[in-house]
Amino acid sequence: MNITIIAETNGNQLHSVTSQLAGAASSLGGTTTLLCPGGVGESEASEISGVSKVISLKGDCFSSFDSGAWSAVMAPHCDGVVIASSSPTGRELASQIASKMGVPVVQDLTEIGQDLKMTRSVYSGKAIETSTASGSCVITLRQNAFESAGSGGNAELITVDSTSEVSVAVKEAMAKASERLDVSEADIIISGGRGMGDPANFSHLNEVADVIGAAVGASRAAVDSWDEIPHNMQVGQTGKTVNPSLYIAVGISGAIQHLAGMRSSKYIVAINKDPDAPIFGVADYGIVATWEEALPSLKEELAKL
Amino acid sequence: MGIYSRVDRDNMTIAVLLKQVPDTTSKIAVSDGRVDQDSVSKWSTSPYDEYALEYALQLKESGGGDLVAITCGPSRSSKMLTDAAAVGADSMLHVEADTSEMDSRQIQSILAAAVKHCGADVILCGKQAADTNSGSTGPGVANLIGAACVGMVSEVNVDGDGFSALRASPSGNERVMVSKPCLFAFDKAATELRRPNVKGIMMAKKKVIETVSPGDLGVDIGESGVKIHAHDLPPEKPPGQKFEGAESVSIVVSKLREEANVI
Ligand SMILES: Cc1cc2nc3c(=O)[nH]c(=O)nc-3n(C[C@H](O)[C@H](O)[C@H](O)COP(=O)(O)OP(=O)(O)OC[C@H]3O[C@@H](n4cnc5c(N)ncnc54)[C@H](O)[C@@H]3O)c2cc1C
């Protein structure tokens, strides 16, 4: 079986999830080719264990994201099972490549088994779907759901110059307001809800986050009520779906739409003053207390570790 | 010459692609290895599609042209089209089909044919549907009709010779320009969704939904390349442990370290 991996990039670097895609590929067995759009991270990519060939695609069309232009260059190099990350850009690119190949795409897999048995979560995590593809297909994998391949590989590196007509022109790029870790990247997340009372109180969440290297998230009520809390922090049905090892919900009631984005976290801690808050129904560890009382000691206890 | 063609306001046909999904508040039951559609207590328009509809209406108001609401799904989905007409969609196209076992390629080919059937050159949809949570449809349809594709959009405006859209990028936000034909896949947007008024509802009731089959549109969707084995309910989580008072923080922290091994 031939496997093609689409490298995930992060600005001018290879994103660490690329190594997870290679890890999943090696569990399938077969010959693995890795495509580096724009040539980003090509040398690092060639050291990922299990990859036999890296195709570094150079060209002006890769200077900003245009899934139509990128896929036009990439699809001809794709063969067999194509694997990408289920990040927003990864999904968009995967869909375009699949459409150009005339094959289906199955998004956001959390497991791959024997004979490419694919597992993913559907209906906001209320059901699990298992399926198989009858021929070539494109799949995207959820970040942190697969083991990384090691380094120490020595893939053949081929550079291909390509051109493609760009139809999405970037007029202006606006950097994120904060340099904090994004919730979709983080292995530990601490999120605040309306119960935080005031956006300024999110500083207490930031302080705890800094101690354990966590990202800070928010409920929709917090995002909608306060301009200071941007939408890219929102977790839930109309925000981000996250899959961290630890999710700490503070002053969040646990509405079904919030749970839709975080219930698949490995461990959930809830801090809420209302003992009947629905969030306690999904929490592995619940603390009935106000955040005013709980956060200072949480910060202190974590700092002791 | 720039890459943008002049927006021909009177001739612009805007399509919004809508999908009906179980409301998030509905319980999901499984029978015979499939999610039991009959047990769904409430069906709604997928939330991101609602933002697409809102911006489609705003584009129509600022740029002129006609707005057609399109869905592909079983007969119950037509209600969603009537709801869209009640807030201002001019016409409605329902491709009636059971989509539950279709793969992404099949759905996309039907919707691409539907868009062509309507002559639409500006297409708006949600970035992903709340049931499958995939996000494949928009980019796939864009490819099939040869449209520029912009995902993660939270705002779109007619801008001189083309359209200006705000999209989320890995490093923040970007304002991008595209020309027709183009497709915008919507994220949650910072806008209020409009609700129908009585007049809108009355008007919508008088409008006729064009109902067709995939065959009527001339598409042969072929076989699905993906075989669903089963839908299962997620494994039950063991009940959690609950502690009273902030004094328990230290207990929980030590459990996170010793039992859960996550810090
Ligand atoms: C279509 C749709 C999509 C949606 N998408 C999302 C989504 O993506 N994400 C999302 O989060 N929501 C979403 N929602 C909204 C969701 O229904 C809830 O309204 C929202 O999650 C509530 O946020 P919250 O828990 O912060 O606020 P509330 O429900 O108001 O809860 C606040 C909690 O804080 C607790 N509290 C108050 N003071 C303190 C204190 N001092 N210390 C500790 N605890 C305290 C209270 O006991 C309460 O439980 C969506 C809704 C709809 C209809």
Image (cartoon, coloured by chain):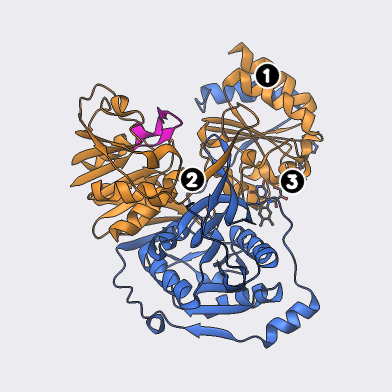
Chain colours: A orange, B blue
Ligand 1 closer than 8 Å to label 1 CB: no
Q: Quadrant of ligand 1?
A: top right
In what element is the residue under mark 2?
A: helix
The mark that comes first in sequence, 3 or 2, is: 2
Q: Is residue B158 left or right of residue A82?
A: right
| Residue A200 in sight in this render | yes
Task: Answer with the quarter of the image where residue A282 lies.
Answer: top right
Residue at the spot of label 3:
A224
Q: With respect to residue B60, does A4 lie above or below?
A: above
Q: Earlier in the sequence, mark 1 or mark 2?
A: 2
- The residue at which mark 2 appears reads as A88
- Kindly identify which chain the residue marked by label 1 belongs to: A
Mark 3 CB in 8 Å range of ligand 1? Answer: no
Give the residue drawn at x 58%, y 78%: B92
Report in which chain the residue with disc 3 lies.
A
Residue B100 in view of the camera? no
Give the labeled residue for mark 1.
A299
Q: What residue type is labelled 1?
A: Lys
Q: Mark 2 lies on which chain?
A: A
Q: Earlier in the sequence, mark 3 or mark 1?
A: 3
